[in-house]
């Protein structure tokens, strides 16, 4: 126990150090020579690039644990040593795609497209290799005209052909499974593509027990409340397969969170944050890793559910203190952590006036690139201001949510536009209640909850900042509708087992003590 608490303290200290270093203005990459990444699992991706085989397989192992920055560097080194190796360019292109994350940034898109075109132009290697290259080129082609979802579907179609033409090639099958996950609809409650991917991966698993991608993608295939128990073995195995990767250490917590296994989630993310910190010290001692911030968001969530509010508070305080942090990547996971961790801390603790005062921090972060993350802050402000009687601030926050939702819809960012719409409806519901329009508030919150039920969470988050149905249950209970409130709170627990505030709502709805409800 002491060791774990010491680890949390270390995370707090390194975040504080990152905030202090921010004033130094050192944003340059520090070249400290080769970086020892550690054990990444066993991958054998056969290529016709002569002596590049071992390096190539290790670079693919990095990619299977979503260590895209290091994978890209590794593939670039292979391309330098073996300029005729078309698959090295394939690797660079793949490292800039990342199917389960956010769409590539403009810089990533540019680098990936250039590499895909180089690979295609070479037309070397085997027919199998050309199939891999054709598939990734299909993603980058017409990037200026076709949207991300359309191009991802083209990539998946290409990988389906590669998998069909090479039924005994395990890497072809694994990458096809990943492509299926990357094109699965968040609104498909049958989980058809996820189950198809899991079937492929489970078929390979007996022969590839130490393959990082197999364990990793099984977790993603089953990262849903109804399926999570099927990935528990993979979750408890993946970190042992690839302990060199911060993401491999973090990823098991997706399943632990789905099942309410808070102690295991906390241990997983402490290990991930520590690994990310050790890694970033080697490449840029003045920076903080986005992997660490991602782990911290999951830690804050788990600590709040377990009732360790002081530990959550320490982490949030340091996140909020960083005015101009140096990050290894200003990406979507960093944006989400900065916005979500403080918001969920104040909302879950019902610190309404503090939630109403939240601002976009760090101020220097490029928030315009991540409007869906910015929306979290306005959502928290709207709820906090409504609950503390500041209707003007609440209305301004709702108006900003409306504007962000429209921007995302115009950008055809379907998933995030829908997520912000859920927040907008819930915020409007809270504002209506605050204005004395209780029935209208209940109607809006029910609409938000029903919409939230039609979709799934993004892998970037451990869960909704506050589930709309939990807000609905709370409002119903406030009106003395205990039976209705109980039903709604119980529905929350089917999606988020062990969620503390939902359990407390159950207790209040059934006149139990909070302690007895938490035990259940």
Image (cartoon, rainbow, N blue to C red):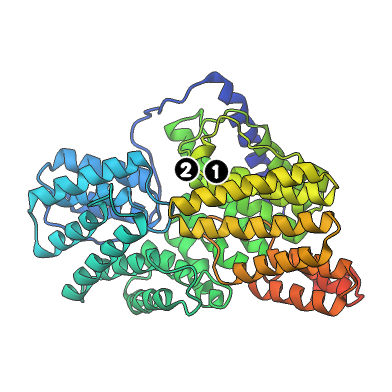
How packed mark 2 is, by other alpha carbons closer than 10 Å (few <14, some 14-19, many 20 or more), is some
Query: Can the viewer see residue 61?
Result: yes
* Residue 49 x, y percent position in the rendering: 12, 52
CA distance for labels 2 and 1:
6 Å
Which of these two is toward me, 40 or 336? 336
Which residue position is annotated with label 1? 335
* Residue 472 x, y percent position in the rendering: 76, 67
Say which quadrant the C terminus sits in: bottom right
Q: Residue at x 70, y 69 (%)?
A: 446
How packed mark 1 is, by other alpha carbons closer than 10 Å (few <14, some 14-19, many 20 or more), is many
* Residue 499 x, y percent position in the rendering: 72, 66
In the rendered structure, find residue 131 and report the number of the disc placed on it. Answer: none
Which residue position is annotated with label 2? 331
Left or right: residue 308 compared with residue 33:
right
Query: Can the viewer see residue 499?
Result: no
Left or right: residue 114 compared with residue 467:
left
Above-or-below relation of 283 to 427: above
């Amino acid at each position: 126990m002491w060791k774990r608490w010491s680890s949390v303290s270390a995370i707090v200290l390194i975040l504080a150090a990152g905030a202090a270093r921010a004033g130094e203005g050192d944003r340059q990459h520090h070249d400290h020579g080769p970086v020892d990444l550690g054990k990444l699992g066993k991958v054998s991706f056969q290529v016709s690039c002569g002596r590049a085989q071992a390096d190539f397989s290790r670079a693919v192992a990095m990619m299977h644990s979503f260590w895209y920055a290091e994978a890209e560097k590794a593939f670039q080194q292979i391309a330098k040593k073996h300029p005729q190796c078309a698959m090295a360019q394939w690797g660079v292109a793949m490292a800039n795609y990342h199917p389960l994350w956010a769409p590539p940034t403009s810089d990533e898109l540019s680098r990936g497209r250039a590499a895909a075109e180089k690979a295609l132009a070479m037309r070397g290697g085997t027919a199998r290799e050309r199939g891999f290259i054709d598939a990734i080129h299909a993603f980058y082609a017409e990037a200026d005209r076709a949207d991300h979802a359309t191009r991802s579907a083209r990539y998946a179609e290409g990988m389906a052909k590669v998998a069909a033409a090479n039924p005994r090639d395990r890497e072809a099958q694994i990458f096809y499974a990943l492509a299926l996950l990357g094109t699965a609809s968040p609104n498909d409650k049958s989980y058809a593509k996820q189950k198809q991917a899991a079937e492929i991966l489970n078929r390979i698993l007996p022969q590839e027990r130490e393959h990082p991608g197999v364990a990793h993608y099984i977790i993603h295939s089953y990262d849903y409340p109804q399926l999570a128990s099927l990935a528990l073995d993979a979750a408890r195995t993946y970190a042992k397969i690839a302990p060199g990767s911060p993401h491999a250490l973090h990823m098991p917590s997706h399943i632990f969170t789905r099942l309410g296994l808070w102690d295991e989630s906390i241990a997983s993310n402490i290990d991930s944050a520590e690994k990310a910190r050790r890694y970033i010290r080697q490449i840029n001692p003045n920076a903080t890793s986005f992997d660490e911030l991602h782990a911290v968001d999951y830690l804050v969530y788990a600590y709040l559910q377990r009732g360790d509010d002081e530990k959550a508070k320490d982490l949030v305080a340091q996140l909020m203190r960083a005015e101009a942090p140096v990050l290894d990547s200003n990406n979507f996971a960093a944006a989400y952590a900065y916005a979500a961790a403080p918001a969920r801390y104040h909302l879950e603790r019902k610190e309404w006036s503090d939630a109403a005062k939240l601002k976009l921090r760090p101020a220097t972060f490029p928030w315009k690139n991540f409007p869906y993350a910015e929306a979290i802050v306005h959502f928290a402000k709207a709820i906090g201001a409504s609950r503390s009687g500041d209707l003007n601030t609440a209305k301004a926050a709702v108006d900003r949510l409306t504007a962000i939702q429209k921007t995302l819809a115009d950008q055809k960012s379907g998933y995030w536009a829908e997520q912000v719409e859920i927040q907008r409806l819930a915020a409007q519901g809270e504002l209506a209640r605050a204005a004395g329009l209780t029935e209208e508030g209940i109607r809006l919150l029910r609409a938000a909850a029903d919409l939230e039920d039609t979709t799934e969470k993004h892998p970037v988050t451990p869960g909704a900042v506050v589930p709309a149905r939990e807000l609905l249950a709370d409002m119903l209970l406030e009106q003395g509708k205990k039976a209705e409130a109980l039903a709604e709170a119980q529905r929350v627990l089917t999606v988020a087992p062990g969620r503390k505030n939902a359990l407390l709502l159950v207790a209040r709805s059934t006149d139990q003590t909070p302690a007895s409800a938490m035990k259940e």
